[in-house]
Image: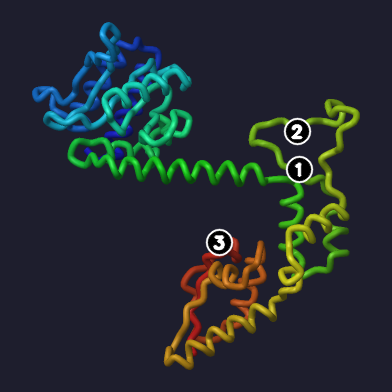
Amino acid sequence: MTAAEKWNKIVEYHHKYIDASEQTVQNIWENIFAELLGYSRLENEVERHRNIQIGSTDRVITDIIIKNGGTDLFVAELKQHNLPFAKSMELQLLSYLKQLRSNTGVLICNMVYIFAHDVSKSDDEQEKIEIEFTQDNPDGIRFVELFSKATFDELAVKEFAHKKTESARKVEVIRSQLTSELIAGALINYFIDEYSVTEIERAIAGFNITITPKGALPRSSALRPPDSTPMSLTAATLACAATHNRTSSEVNTKTSDVVNYIKSKMQKSKAAGAISVVIRGGEVHRELGLVSRIPTVCGAMRKLLKDGDIIHYAPPSGNGSRLEIEYFL
Protein backbone atom coordinates (compact mmCIF):
# COMPACT_ATOMS: atom_id res chain seq x y z
CA MET A 1 0.00 0.00 0.00
CA THR A 2 1.16 3.54 -0.71
CA ALA A 3 1.34 6.17 2.02
CA ALA A 4 -1.80 7.79 0.56
CA GLU A 5 -3.70 4.48 0.63
CA LYS A 6 -2.63 3.86 4.23
CA TRP A 7 -3.74 7.34 5.30
CA ASN A 8 -7.11 6.93 3.60
CA LYS A 9 -7.55 3.61 5.42
CA ILE A 10 -6.78 5.38 8.72
CA VAL A 11 -9.41 8.02 7.87
CA GLU A 12 -11.89 5.26 7.08
CA TYR A 13 -11.36 3.64 10.49
CA HIS A 14 -11.54 7.00 12.26
CA HIS A 15 -14.94 7.76 10.73
CA LYS A 16 -16.21 4.19 11.21
CA TYR A 17 -15.46 4.30 14.93
CA ILE A 18 -16.21 7.99 15.50
CA ASP A 19 -18.38 7.25 18.58
CA ALA A 20 -16.45 4.22 19.83
CA SER A 21 -15.17 3.88 23.39
CA GLU A 22 -11.60 4.76 24.31
CA GLN A 23 -10.82 1.06 24.72
CA THR A 24 -11.96 0.40 21.14
CA VAL A 25 -9.88 3.34 19.93
CA GLN A 26 -6.90 1.83 21.77
CA ASN A 27 -7.32 -1.48 19.92
CA ILE A 28 -7.78 0.24 16.55
CA TRP A 29 -4.62 2.31 16.87
CA GLU A 30 -2.55 -0.60 18.09
CA ASN A 31 -3.56 -2.35 14.86
CA ILE A 32 -2.85 0.77 12.78
CA PHE A 33 0.67 1.10 14.17
CA ALA A 34 1.31 -2.61 13.63
CA GLU A 35 -0.38 -3.38 10.31
CA LEU A 36 -0.18 -0.06 8.49
CA LEU A 37 2.92 1.58 9.96
CA GLY A 38 5.01 -1.56 10.33
CA TYR A 39 5.80 -1.92 14.05
CA SER A 40 6.09 -5.46 15.38
CA ARG A 41 3.82 -6.72 18.11
CA LEU A 42 5.93 -9.84 18.49
CA GLU A 43 8.90 -7.65 19.38
CA ASN A 44 6.71 -5.52 21.69
CA GLU A 45 7.27 -2.43 19.52
CA VAL A 46 3.65 -1.39 20.16
CA GLU A 47 3.71 -1.18 23.93
CA ARG A 48 0.43 -0.50 25.67
CA HIS A 49 -0.15 0.92 29.14
CA ARG A 50 3.39 1.34 30.43
CA ASN A 51 3.53 2.27 34.10
CA ILE A 52 5.74 5.29 34.77
CA GLN A 53 6.76 5.88 38.37
CA ILE A 54 6.93 9.61 39.13
CA GLY A 55 7.44 9.46 42.87
CA SER A 56 7.42 7.10 45.81
CA THR A 57 3.70 6.46 45.39
CA ASP A 58 2.51 8.26 42.25
CA ARG A 59 2.52 6.74 38.79
CA VAL A 60 1.01 7.35 35.36
CA ILE A 61 0.04 4.96 32.58
CA THR A 62 0.62 5.79 28.92
CA ASP A 63 -1.71 4.60 26.18
CA ILE A 64 0.89 3.53 23.60
CA ILE A 65 4.66 3.84 23.35
CA ILE A 66 6.08 2.98 19.94
CA LYS A 67 9.54 1.44 19.93
CA ASN A 68 12.09 0.18 17.45
CA GLY A 69 13.76 -2.74 19.12
CA GLY A 70 14.39 -1.54 22.65
CA THR A 71 14.43 2.18 21.81
CA ASP A 72 11.43 4.41 22.51
CA LEU A 73 10.48 6.43 19.40
CA PHE A 74 7.31 8.32 20.32
CA VAL A 75 4.32 8.36 22.65
CA ALA A 76 0.72 8.16 21.44
CA GLU A 77 -2.08 9.49 23.62
CA LEU A 78 -5.54 8.29 22.55
CA LYS A 79 -8.96 9.84 23.11
CA GLN A 80 -12.37 9.08 21.65
CA HIS A 81 -12.50 10.04 17.98
CA ASN A 82 -15.43 12.42 18.50
CA LEU A 83 -13.70 14.52 21.17
CA PRO A 84 -12.32 17.94 20.24
CA PHE A 85 -8.89 19.01 21.36
CA ALA A 86 -8.61 20.18 24.97
CA LYS A 87 -5.67 21.76 26.76
CA SER A 88 -5.77 19.01 29.38
CA MET A 89 -5.03 16.44 26.65
CA GLU A 90 -1.97 18.40 25.59
CA LEU A 91 -0.68 18.76 29.13
CA GLN A 92 -1.14 15.05 29.75
CA LEU A 93 0.89 14.11 26.67
CA LEU A 94 3.58 16.68 27.44
CA SER A 95 3.93 15.28 30.96
CA TYR A 96 4.57 11.82 29.50
CA LEU A 97 7.17 13.21 27.12
CA LYS A 98 8.97 14.94 29.97
CA GLN A 99 8.89 11.86 32.19
CA LEU A 100 10.20 9.64 29.38
CA ARG A 101 12.60 12.30 28.08
CA SER A 102 11.06 11.79 24.67
CA ASN A 103 10.82 14.48 22.00
CA THR A 104 7.94 13.25 19.85
CA GLY A 105 4.30 12.78 20.76
CA VAL A 106 1.05 12.07 18.92
CA LEU A 107 -2.39 12.93 20.26
CA ILE A 108 -5.40 11.28 18.61
CA CYS A 109 -8.89 12.71 19.11
CA ASN A 110 -11.08 14.34 16.43
CA MET A 111 -7.81 15.19 14.68
CA VAL A 112 -4.19 14.07 14.78
CA TYR A 113 -1.90 16.38 16.75
CA ILE A 114 1.87 16.05 16.43
CA PHE A 115 4.09 17.49 19.15
CA ALA A 116 7.81 18.16 18.76
CA HIS A 117 8.87 18.62 22.37
CA ASP A 118 11.70 21.00 23.19
CA VAL A 119 12.99 20.89 26.78
CA SER A 120 14.16 24.50 26.51
CA LYS A 121 10.59 25.75 25.98
CA SER A 122 7.62 26.03 28.30
CA ASP A 123 4.47 23.99 27.73
CA ASP A 124 2.77 26.95 26.05
CA GLU A 125 5.69 27.38 23.65
CA GLN A 126 5.79 23.79 22.39
CA GLU A 127 5.23 23.38 18.66
CA LYS A 128 2.27 21.29 17.59
CA ILE A 129 0.41 20.80 14.34
CA GLU A 130 -3.04 19.43 13.62
CA ILE A 131 -4.07 17.12 10.81
CA GLU A 132 -7.71 16.63 9.83
CA PHE A 133 -9.01 13.15 9.14
CA THR A 134 -9.87 13.81 5.49
CA GLN A 135 -9.20 11.62 2.47
CA ASP A 136 -5.99 12.39 0.55
CA ASN A 137 -4.96 15.06 3.06
CA PRO A 138 -1.31 15.84 2.14
CA ASP A 139 -0.42 16.35 5.80
CA GLY A 140 -2.00 13.01 6.66
CA ILE A 141 0.00 11.29 3.96
CA ARG A 142 3.12 12.96 5.35
CA PHE A 143 2.12 11.68 8.81
CA VAL A 144 2.19 8.11 7.48
CA GLU A 145 5.58 8.69 5.87
CA LEU A 146 7.09 10.24 8.98
CA PHE A 147 5.75 7.75 11.54
CA SER A 148 6.20 4.48 9.64
CA LYS A 149 8.86 2.24 11.13
CA ALA A 150 10.95 2.09 7.96
CA THR A 151 11.16 5.87 7.60
CA PHE A 152 10.74 7.30 11.12
CA ASP A 153 13.17 10.15 11.73
CA GLU A 154 12.79 12.35 14.81
CA LEU A 155 14.58 15.28 13.17
CA ALA A 156 12.30 15.06 10.12
CA VAL A 157 9.25 15.14 12.41
CA LYS A 158 10.65 18.19 14.20
CA GLU A 159 11.35 19.97 10.90
CA PHE A 160 7.86 19.16 9.61
CA ALA A 161 6.25 20.49 12.80
CA HIS A 162 8.37 23.64 12.73
CA LYS A 163 7.57 24.44 9.10
CA LYS A 164 3.85 23.87 9.59
CA THR A 165 3.86 25.97 12.78
CA GLU A 166 5.68 28.82 11.05
CA SER A 167 3.31 28.64 8.11
CA ALA A 168 0.28 28.76 10.43
CA ARG A 169 1.78 31.77 12.23
CA LYS A 170 2.28 33.61 8.95
CA VAL A 171 -1.30 32.84 7.89
CA GLU A 172 -2.55 34.40 11.13
CA VAL A 173 -0.41 37.50 10.52
CA ILE A 174 -1.90 37.85 7.03
CA ARG A 175 -5.42 37.40 8.40
CA SER A 176 -4.84 40.07 11.03
CA GLN A 177 -3.81 42.52 8.30
CA LEU A 178 -6.72 41.81 5.95
CA THR A 179 -8.71 45.01 6.28
CA SER A 180 -11.03 46.94 4.02
CA GLU A 181 -8.39 49.67 3.77
CA LEU A 182 -5.82 47.17 2.52
CA ILE A 183 -8.20 45.90 -0.17
CA ALA A 184 -8.96 49.49 -1.13
CA GLY A 185 -5.27 50.25 -1.53
CA ALA A 186 -4.81 47.14 -3.67
CA LEU A 187 -7.63 48.28 -5.97
CA ILE A 188 -6.00 51.64 -6.50
CA ASN A 189 -2.65 49.96 -7.15
CA TYR A 190 -4.21 47.61 -9.67
CA PHE A 191 -5.91 50.27 -11.81
CA ILE A 192 -3.61 53.26 -11.42
CA ASP A 193 -1.43 52.50 -14.48
CA GLU A 194 -4.36 52.58 -16.90
CA TYR A 195 -6.77 55.03 -15.33
CA SER A 196 -6.71 58.31 -13.47
CA VAL A 197 -7.55 58.52 -9.77
CA THR A 198 -10.74 60.39 -10.66
CA GLU A 199 -11.87 57.58 -12.97
CA ILE A 200 -11.13 54.94 -10.34
CA GLU A 201 -13.02 56.97 -7.72
CA ARG A 202 -16.07 57.25 -9.97
CA ALA A 203 -15.99 53.51 -10.74
CA ILE A 204 -15.89 52.37 -7.12
CA ALA A 205 -17.92 55.14 -5.50
CA GLY A 206 -21.06 53.01 -5.60
CA PHE A 207 -19.52 49.99 -3.85
CA ASN A 208 -19.24 49.09 -0.18
CA ILE A 209 -15.95 47.29 0.38
CA THR A 210 -15.99 44.92 3.34
CA ILE A 211 -14.03 41.88 4.43
CA THR A 212 -15.59 39.35 6.80
CA PRO A 213 -14.66 35.80 7.86
CA LYS A 214 -15.91 33.10 5.49
CA GLY A 215 -19.37 31.96 6.47
CA ALA A 216 -20.03 34.97 8.68
CA LEU A 217 -23.19 36.92 7.99
CA PRO A 218 -22.60 40.62 7.27
CA ARG A 219 -24.22 42.84 9.84
CA SER A 220 -27.15 44.77 8.50
CA SER A 221 -27.66 48.46 9.26
CA ALA A 222 -30.50 47.53 11.58
CA LEU A 223 -28.21 45.32 13.68
CA ARG A 224 -25.27 47.74 13.74
CA PRO A 225 -24.85 49.69 16.98
CA PRO A 226 -26.05 53.33 16.57
CA ASP A 227 -22.62 54.84 17.25
CA SER A 228 -20.64 52.48 14.99
CA THR A 229 -19.18 53.47 11.63
CA PRO A 230 -20.57 51.74 8.51
CA MET A 231 -18.10 49.45 6.77
CA SER A 232 -18.37 51.26 3.44
CA LEU A 233 -15.40 53.04 1.90
CA THR A 234 -15.82 56.27 0.05
CA ALA A 235 -13.57 57.25 -2.85
CA ALA A 236 -11.71 59.60 -0.53
CA THR A 237 -11.00 56.73 1.85
CA LEU A 238 -9.74 54.63 -1.05
CA ALA A 239 -7.41 57.32 -2.27
CA CYS A 240 -6.13 57.87 1.26
CA ALA A 241 -5.55 54.15 1.74
CA ALA A 242 -3.69 53.89 -1.52
CA THR A 243 -1.44 56.81 -0.65
CA HIS A 244 -0.81 55.37 2.81
CA ASN A 245 0.14 51.94 1.49
CA ARG A 246 2.49 53.11 -1.27
CA THR A 247 5.58 55.27 -1.25
CA SER A 248 5.90 58.10 -3.75
CA SER A 249 8.38 56.10 -5.82
CA GLU A 250 5.92 53.20 -6.01
CA VAL A 251 3.06 55.47 -7.01
CA ASN A 252 5.16 57.09 -9.74
CA THR A 253 6.53 53.84 -11.16
CA LYS A 254 5.00 53.40 -14.61
CA THR A 255 5.18 50.70 -17.23
CA SER A 256 7.91 52.66 -19.04
CA ASP A 257 10.09 52.57 -15.90
CA VAL A 258 9.79 48.81 -15.69
CA VAL A 259 10.49 48.51 -19.44
CA ASN A 260 13.71 50.49 -19.01
CA TYR A 261 14.75 48.33 -16.07
CA ILE A 262 14.20 45.11 -18.01
CA LYS A 263 16.08 46.56 -20.99
CA SER A 264 19.05 47.28 -18.73
CA LYS A 265 19.03 43.65 -17.55
CA MET A 266 18.96 42.50 -21.17
CA GLN A 267 21.85 44.79 -22.09
CA LYS A 268 23.94 43.47 -19.20
CA SER A 269 23.28 39.88 -20.25
CA LYS A 270 24.18 40.64 -23.85
CA ALA A 271 27.41 42.35 -22.77
CA ALA A 272 28.25 39.22 -20.79
CA GLY A 273 27.95 37.13 -23.96
CA ALA A 274 24.53 35.56 -23.37
CA ILE A 275 22.28 34.87 -26.34
CA SER A 276 19.07 35.07 -24.28
CA VAL A 277 17.84 36.09 -20.85
CA VAL A 278 14.92 34.73 -18.83
CA ILE A 279 12.87 37.37 -17.01
CA ARG A 280 10.42 36.45 -14.26
CA GLY A 281 7.72 38.85 -13.12
CA GLY A 282 8.12 38.20 -9.42
CA GLU A 283 11.87 38.79 -9.52
CA VAL A 284 11.53 42.14 -11.30
CA HIS A 285 8.77 43.17 -8.89
CA ARG A 286 11.00 42.33 -5.91
CA GLU A 287 14.17 43.89 -7.37
CA LEU A 288 12.36 47.17 -7.95
CA GLY A 289 10.93 47.12 -4.42
CA LEU A 290 7.35 47.42 -5.68
CA VAL A 291 4.16 46.65 -3.80
CA SER A 292 1.09 45.21 -5.57
CA ARG A 293 2.40 46.24 -9.00
CA ILE A 294 2.51 42.86 -10.71
CA PRO A 295 0.10 44.01 -13.49
CA THR A 296 2.54 46.84 -14.29
CA VAL A 297 5.50 44.46 -14.44
CA CYS A 298 3.64 41.95 -16.61
CA GLY A 299 2.52 44.71 -18.96
CA ALA A 300 6.12 45.85 -19.36
CA MET A 301 7.30 42.31 -20.01
CA ARG A 302 4.71 41.78 -22.75
CA LYS A 303 5.53 45.15 -24.27
CA LEU A 304 9.09 43.93 -24.91
CA LEU A 305 8.01 40.69 -26.60
CA LYS A 306 9.22 40.25 -30.18
CA ASP A 307 9.17 37.43 -32.72
CA GLY A 308 11.21 34.49 -31.53
CA ASP A 309 10.89 35.19 -27.81
CA ILE A 310 9.38 32.40 -25.72
CA ILE A 311 6.75 32.64 -23.00
CA HIS A 312 7.72 29.75 -20.74
CA TYR A 313 4.84 30.30 -18.33
CA ALA A 314 1.80 32.56 -18.38
CA PRO A 315 -0.59 32.59 -15.38
CA PRO A 316 -4.24 31.80 -16.22
CA SER A 317 -5.23 35.35 -15.26
CA GLY A 318 -2.60 36.81 -17.58
CA ASN A 319 -0.85 38.69 -14.79
CA GLY A 320 1.11 37.03 -12.03
CA SER A 321 4.50 36.82 -10.38
CA ARG A 322 5.19 33.54 -12.17
CA LEU A 323 5.05 35.05 -15.68
CA GLU A 324 8.29 33.92 -17.29
CA ILE A 325 9.58 35.06 -20.69
CA GLU A 326 12.86 34.24 -22.45
CA TYR A 327 14.07 37.16 -24.57
CA PHE A 328 16.61 36.47 -27.30
CA LEU A 329 19.30 39.11 -27.54
Image coordinates of residue 33 in percent, x first then y, are 23, 27
- Distance from disc 2 to disc 3, alpha carbons, whole Å, reads 31 Å
Residue at 43% across, 31% down = 132
Give the number of the disc on residue 316: 3
Image coordinates of residue 61 in percent, x first then y, are 27, 13
Residue at label 1? 210
Q: Quadrant of residue 173?
A: top right
Which residue is situated farthest in the right direction here?
A: 226
Instruction: From the viewer's perspective, tell me whether residue 19 is left or right of residue 300.
Output: left
* Amino acid type, label 1: Thr
Label 1 residue SS = loop
- Distance from disc 1 to disc 2, alpha carbons, whole Å, reads 9 Å
Label 3 or label 1, whichever lies nearer to me, is 1
The reply to whether dot 1 and dot 2 touch (C-beta < 8 Å) is: yes
| The N terminus sits in image quarter | top left
Number of residues whose C-alpha sits closer than 10 Å to that of mark 1, classed few (under 14), some (14–19) or many (20 or more): some
Give the number of the disc on residue 218: 2
- Distance from disc 3 to disc 1, alpha carbons, whole Å, reads 26 Å
Residue at 49% across, 90% down = 329
* Amino acid type, label 3: Pro
Number of residues whose C-alpha sits closer than 10 Å to that of mark 2, classed few (under 14), some (14–19) or many (20 or more): few
Would you place residue 179 above or below residue 58 in this image? Answer: below
